[in-house]
Image (cartoon, rainbow, N blue to C red):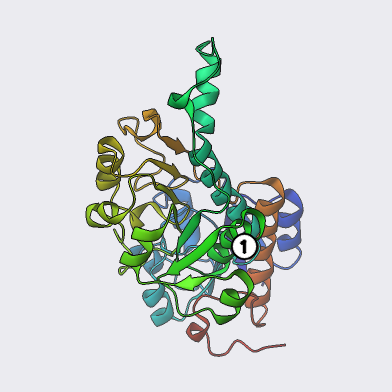
Amino acid sequence: MPKRILAYGRLSDDQLAELARDFEVDVFERLDSANDSAFRTALKGAHGLIGSSLAITSDLLDEAPELEVIASISVGYDNYPVDELTRRGILLCNTPDVLTETTADTGFALIMATARRVVELAEFVKRGDWQTSIGEAQFGSDVHGKTLGMIGFGRIGAAVARRGALGFGMKVRYSNASPKTELEKELGAERRELDELLAEADFVCVTVPLTPETHHLIGAREFGLMKRSACFVNIARGKVVDEAALIGALETGEIRAAGLDVFEQEPLSPESPLPHMANVVALPHIGSATHETRNAMAQRAVDNITRALKGQRPISPVNAEAWPTTQDE
């Protein structure tokens, strides 16, 4: 009997067909919640799950006694109880690397948009307010030559910094990461304690993963340390930032602007003032949202789950120790 996979979201017909060559595949389109009765029933015989944006809980795992592997079509894995998965011997895989450059493009686009007030001034033109030559009320600020502070300096953080240093001559500072000697040589980057970085940077960009330690890492105190002329960009996870404190800092002018691709609640609540603030560029979590990158992420997940269910080491396991019988080829 072939092993059984439950697939939900963002897989092409070709990718589903690839899985179906070796496994029995049940497809759940537009699965909004793990409480879907058909999905929960199907869990009982599932050996693998592949998809994204579905919160996996302990009670859900109780209904999946045969489960061996979850292939998430994402880099972040805060939707998964990793320790619990490891305890149960369930392997979790993610999709790093394939979205690094695309997400960095989004981050730098937000840096440029906040600095030059791109969205705000495009609306200015649309409203018909451009009647005379613009004056200081519409001026933005330069990006080239400024100081870029990276909170987090992993793959994506380094890719953002590379754009700034090599493309715009920015001075790079980084924190919340171990020393990165090679990147310091390549980009002239310098490591700082978080408080020092916040005080020094003209642009602060957050790329750390969400963990218990980084939850609300940036709050009222941290915004108070930043320059009043600074722009704040978050392409990490919404809950890394205390959103109420961010709103307060933007309203009072403690910081000049914010570019946001992630929020504490997603989709963003209609009651949130953020998308209506002139000094905010708000995007609907599009960091990796290009045709090419989303397809590559899905393919990585397909490769991970296929290899794992065949007893081969997947390309990108999160908790490889969960399944010690997995062997390298």
Is 103 left or right of 219, judged from the image as shown?
A: right
Q: Which residue is mark 1?
A: 162
Residue 221, position as x, y percentages in the image = 22, 56
> In the picture, residue 253 is in which quadrant?
top left
Residue 185, position as x, y percentages in the image = 61, 77
Residue occupying the point 73% across, 56% down: 15
In the rendered view, would you say 7 is above or below 194?
A: above
- Mark 1, secondary structure of its residue: helix
Q: Is residue 20 visible?
A: yes
Residue occupying the point 45% across, 38% down: 282
> In the picture, residue 57 is in which quadrant?
bottom left
In the rendered view, would you say 279 is above or below 10?
A: above
In the rendered view, would you say 318 is above or below 257?
A: below
Residue 179, position as x, y percentages in the image = 48, 80
Is 26 left or right of 211, judged from the image as shown?
A: right
Quarter of the picture containing the N terminus is bottom right
Residue occupying the point 51% across, 53% down: 146
Residue 301, position as x, y percentages in the image = 63, 64
Q: Is residue 283 visible?
A: no
Across the whole image, how many numbered discs are drawn on residues? 1
**Mark 1 burial class by Cα count in 10 Å: few <14, some 14-19, many 20+:** many
Is residue 233 or residue 307 the one in the foreground?
Answer: 233
In the rendered view, would you say 210 is above or below 28?
A: below
Is residue 270 or residue 128 the one in the foreground?
Answer: 128
Is residue 218 or residue 179 the one in the foreground?
Answer: 179
Amino acid tagged 1? Arg
Quarter of the picture containing the C terminus is bottom right
